[in-house]
Amino acid sequence: MTWAPKGEWPVIWLSKDAKLAPGKSIRGGVPICWPWFGPHASEAKFPGHGFARTVPWAVIDTQKLGNGATRLVFRIVQSDVTRAQWPQASELEIHMLIGPTLEIDLVTRNTSTSAITVGDALHTYFEVGDVRQAKVHGLDGCPYIDKVDGGARKQQSGPVSIAGEVDRIYLESSGDCVIDDPVLGRRIRIAKQGSASSVVWNPWIEKAEKMGDLGDNGYLNMLCVESTNADTDVVNIAPGAEHHLWVRYSVEALGGAD
């Protein structure tokens, strides 16, 4: 999917070479990582980032609101395949409010009689004019895991800039993030709740070429800033309870108030 407020350049990026095929993750949009983030803790054969981004979802509700916005509700379709990888009784829904801003609420319900632990993420691809000039604010001082540097533990100093491959899990980062994009002259604001970590990712040149679905120089025009519960920041959900990972994406002219 992609999304743009009226009169704006697209905010959610979708590769021109994205492969829209059953069982395949889509290069762009907002892939859903669930019920784990990254590799499975014990089963190497299970898909990275879980199965939610590659299985069917059912439309549960659609509403056109009086202010012109649209509300959509989807629920993951469970199958023998998903139950083999995740036998815990649970439901996963995504609630979207589409209008001048984009709100996404990923809802995990524990319908079992025992607690469950999940990792999840909204793996959002944001469109930028030139990733080399973009900066991500809101992560200053956060500890992070640098996956490009063998999982080394580091600490962020100042805004995040992109000058090569970046794959970082920022821990203790429950606050909002902002992407400043001087090329498109705008600021993308990422408000979130229910997320204790953030991921910043760009594959850069060599890895992008190996992917085959990023498009020519596609890495220059995308930047993933993901609202996550990853690594040690997993979520424990009591029986009968639910967890919400909620985000709101908005756009303003660069130079507006922080």
Image (tube, rainbow, N blue to C red):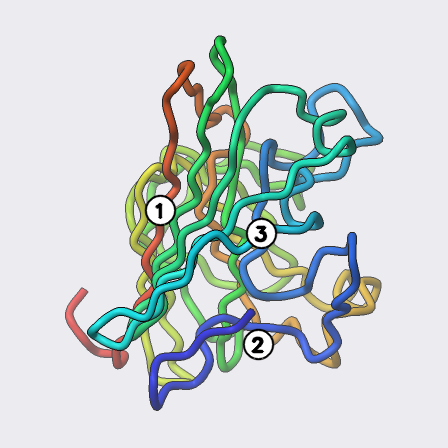
Alpha carbon distance from label 2 to label 1? 25 Å
Q: Is residue 59 above or below residue 119?
A: below
Look at mark 3 in the image and give the residue it sits on: 58
Residue 252: % across, % down:
26, 76
CB within 8 Å, label 2 to label 3: no
Q: Which mark is residue 140?
A: none
In the image, farthest residue toward the top: 114
Category of crowding for the residue at label 3, using alpha-carbon neighbours closer than 10 angstroms: few (below 14), some (14–19), many (at least 20): few
In the image, farthest residue toward the left: 257
Q: Is residue 253 above or below residue 174?
A: below
Residue 235: % across, % down:
44, 25
> Which circle's residue, 2 or 1, is located before the other in the chain?
2
Look at mark 1 in the image and give the residue it sits on: 246
In the image, farthest residue toward the bottom: 7
Look at mark 2 in the image and give the residue it sits on: 221
- Under mark 2, the amino acid is Asn
- Under mark 3, the amino acid is Ala
Residue name at image x 70 percent, y 48 percent: 55
User: Could you say which is closer to the camera, residue 22 or residue 248?
Assistant: 22
Q: Is residue 188 visible?
A: no
In the rendered structure, the answer to whether residue 240 lies left or right of residue 193 reads right
Residue name at image x 54 percent, y 59 percent: 30
> Which circle's residue, 2 or 3, is located before the other in the chain?
3
In the rendered structure, the answer to whether residue 170 lies left or right of residue 255 reads right
Residue 237: % across, % down:
42, 20
Category of crowding for the residue at label 1, using alpha-carbon neighbours closer than 10 angstroms: few (below 14), some (14–19), many (at least 20): many
Alpha carbon distance from label 2 to label 3? 31 Å
Quadrant in which residue 243 is drawn: top left
User: Could you say which is closer to the camera, residue 33 or residue 147?
Assistant: 33
> Which circle's residue, 3 or 1, is located before the other in the chain?
3
Q: Quadrant of the N terminus?
A: bottom right
